[in-house]
Amino acid sequence: MMKQAGFFDGDERLARLSGLGDQLEAFSRTVDFEAFRPDLEKALAYSDGSKGGRPPFDPVLMFKILVIQTLNNLSDDRTEYLINDRLSF
């Protein structure tokens, strides 16, 4: 019989990944992505939202995704899959 996932199982899984040397954690400790925010916001020139519509994704988050995608030579489809499938991504 398979054990049902508990409330803290996700935290334990992430802690195990961290202990194994999670590439994404090391990357976050090394690169200050927030330093890119002013340039990203200027380049993207988002509207003020007065016309409605869906709010945009955070530009720093999208930049991180592009960098990780490039470093790991991932296609757009594979990147989307990994983001949806893996909690660590």
Image (spheres, grey):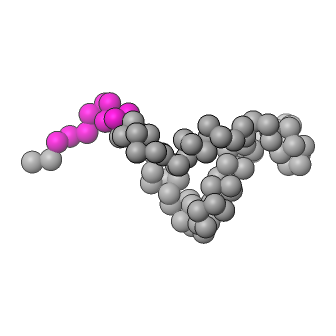
- Farthest residue, direction left: 1
Q: Nearer the viewer, residue 19 or 69?
A: 19
Q: Residue 6 magenta-drawn?
A: yes
* Residue 46 in view here: no
Q: Residue at x 49, y 53 (%)?
A: 84
Q: Residue at x 62, y 40 (%)?
A: 28
Left or right, residue 54 beside residue 6: right
Q: Is the magenta stretch mostly helix, strand or loop?
A: loop
* Residue 35 in view here: yes
- Farthest residue, direction top: 8
Left or right, residue 29 beside residue 21: right
Q: Which of 6 and 37 is in front in this view?
A: 37
Q: Give the range drawn in magenta.
A: 3-12
Q: Which residue is drawn at 9% across and 48% down?
A: 1
Q: In which quarter of the image is residue 5?
A: top left
Residue 88 x %, y %? 48, 45
Q: In which quarter of the image is residue 55?
A: top right
Residue 82 x %, y %? 50, 57
